Amino acid sequence: MNKKLIILGSGGPFTLPRFFCECDTCETARREPALRRTRASAAILGDEVTLIDAGPDLEMQLERESIRRIDNILITHWHYDHVAGLGAINYPQVMREWKPIDVYVEKSLISHFAKELIYLEDRVTLHSISPGDTIALPDATIEVVKTAHTEDSVGYIFNSKSRIAYLVDTALPSDETARSISDADTLILDAMFDSADIEWRHFTVHGAIDFWKSSGPERCILTHLACHKWANWHWIAGFTCKERLQIERQNPGLQFAYDGLEISL
Ligand SMILES: [Zn+2]
Ligand SMILES: [Zn+2]
Ligand SMILES: [Zn+2]
């Protein structure tokens, strides 16, 4: 089997369409299921299955991609859209007698398991990680880097035949992180808002493109897409599909992620 990274979900903190939104972006996604997005997560598929985050759409994402086991989970940070699916790993472990799943989580977030997920006690083996650490798995050697989102948020760089950086949920990262990703082949990057008139701990599409161009990787895939813009304290419809294609054409090497997108590792 060729090793690959698959985008399980390319959306932001809400699915697209959002159940409470009737903007043009959401109505278009209702009419065209291919434009829908589930919450941001990814998986490395090779000798093992390694998930990056386990959001609330986890079970549907695994079913859609016919992924029938989980060996490792790498957590980026403790927000609902990235960890709310963790509870779902309880049942298959009981029913299929899986061995404990190795879960890698930033050291100050480990305590969440004892407080919120105590029923997973026998089902996971927790590994405490920090930026600067390296995780050696059969399919890739993984570097842990700091993202600019929460105090404890991290990103990952996967090294196999190629070098892929996954920085979901981040604003402009530190110089140290920027240096670490400079020789990556592919950068997978947060671009939550199509545009925004206030500061967030996320990139906008054009902010992400500017950072990618200054950082070095040849290819950039934008993910964690809300597909809305933020103006005058309102979330409103963002780029149309046509505008998105135009942005891709104007920026060779750039691609907007979609659910199911595969990248060789
Ligand atoms: Zn998020
Ligand atoms: Zn909408
Ligand atoms: Zn977040």
Image (cartoon, rainbow, N blue to C red):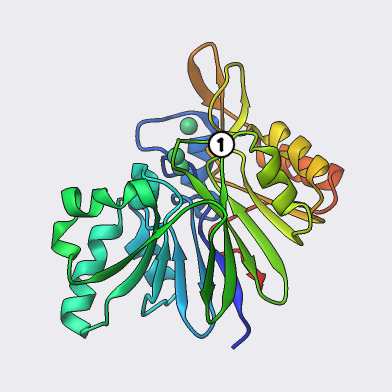
Q: Position of residue 256 (x, y in %)?
A: 67, 49
Residue 17 visible in image: no
Q: Position of residue 69 (x, y in %)?
A: 36, 79
Residue at x 66%, y 75% (from the top left corner): 160
Q: Position of residue 225 (x, y in %)?
A: 56, 42
Residue 154 visible in image: yes
Res 62 → quadrant: bottom left
Image quarter (top left, top right, bottom left or bottom right) of the N terminus: bottom right
| Viewer-side residue, 199 vs 249 | 199
| Viewer-side residue, 30 vs 189 | 189
Image quarter (top left, top right, bottom left or bottom right) of the C terminus: bottom right
Residue at mark 1: C-beta within 8 A of ligand 3 = no
Q: Position of residue 55 (x, y in %)?
A: 37, 53
Res 128 → quadrant: bottom left
Total number of numbered discs in the rendering = 1
Against 68, residue 38 (above or below) is above
Q: Secondary structure at mark 1?
A: loop
215 with respect to 204 (left or right): right
Residue at x 22%, y 77% (from the top left corner): 93
107 with respect to 213 (left or right): left
Q: Which residue is mark 1?
A: 148
Against 121, residue 251 (above or below) is above
Residue at x 70%, y 32% (from the top left corner): 207
Res 178 → quadrant: top right
Residue farthest toward the left in the current orientation of the protein: 119
**Label 1 sits on what residue type?**
Ala
Residue at x 77%, y 52% (from the top left corner): 182
Against 54, residue 243 (above or below) is above
Crowd class of label 1 (few under 14; some 14 to 19; many from 20; radius 10 Å)? many
| Viewer-side residue, 47 vs 243 | 47
Against 247, residue 258 (above or below) is below
